[in-house]
Image (tube, rainbow, N blue to C red):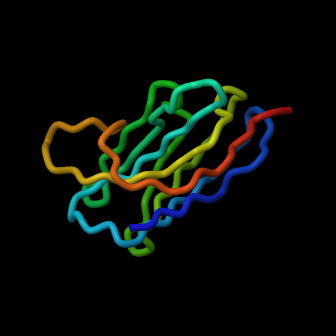
């Protein structure tokens, strides 16, 4: 299983970025691709996720209304679109994948596979 995250960079407050997570080798029929971020000195935070088949989405309260996650199953790729970025969105963003085996599951934990991070810096 491989996950490749990209698209980070430096952006001014109020700006936008679109990250990309390309996955390969994820075998469960029903799985979720999630995005996490970690700022220096802070705990890792689950930001968003999307399931591969029914497209169910999750957003942390801190990004609701500003981030939109979509998927392209033909390309096995997930795209979080990040708009109205704030300095507190700064951090290393990671994508991860987990199987979904029950109706009730936690979109911010249980991830088995992780990609490398991509740095997002929001600063003027």
Quarter of the image with the N terminus is bottom left
Q: Position of residue 102 (x, y in %)?
A: 13, 45
Q: Position of residue 52 (x, y in %)?
A: 31, 59
Which residue is more in the foreground, 37 or 67? 37
**Above-or-below relation of 38 to 49:** above
Which residue extends farthest right? 124
Q: Position of residue 63 (x, y in %)?
A: 53, 31
Q: How many marks?
A: 0
The picture quadrant where one finds residue 120 is: top right
Which residue is more in the foreground, 23 or 103? 23
| Residue at left offset 53%, top offset 63% | 4
**Above-or-below relation of 71 to 67:** below
| Residue at left offset 63%, top offset 42% | 92
The picture quadrant where one finds residue 116 is: bottom right
Q: Quick check: 28 left or right of 33?
A: left
Q: Quick check: 72 left or right of 105?
A: right
Q: Quick check: 54 left or right of 9?
A: left
| Residue at left offset 31%, top offset 52% | 98
**Above-or-below relation of 87 to 97:** above
């Amino acid at each position: 299983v491989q996950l490749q995250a990209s698209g980070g960079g430096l952006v001014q407050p109020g700006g936008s970025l679109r990250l990309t997570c390309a996955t390969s080798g994820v075998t469960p029929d029903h799985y979720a691709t999630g995005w996490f971020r970690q700022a220096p000195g802070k705990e890792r935070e689950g930001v968003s996720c999307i399931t591969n088949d029914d497209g169910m989405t999750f957003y942390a309260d801190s990004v609701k209304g500003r981030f939109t996650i979509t998927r392209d199953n033909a390309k096995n790729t997930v795209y979080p679109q990040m708009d109205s970025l704030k300095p507190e969105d700064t951090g290393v963003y990671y994508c991860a994948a987990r199987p979904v085996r029950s109706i009730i599951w936690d979109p911010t934990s249980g991830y088995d596979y992780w990609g490398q991070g991509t740095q997002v810096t929001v600063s003027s």
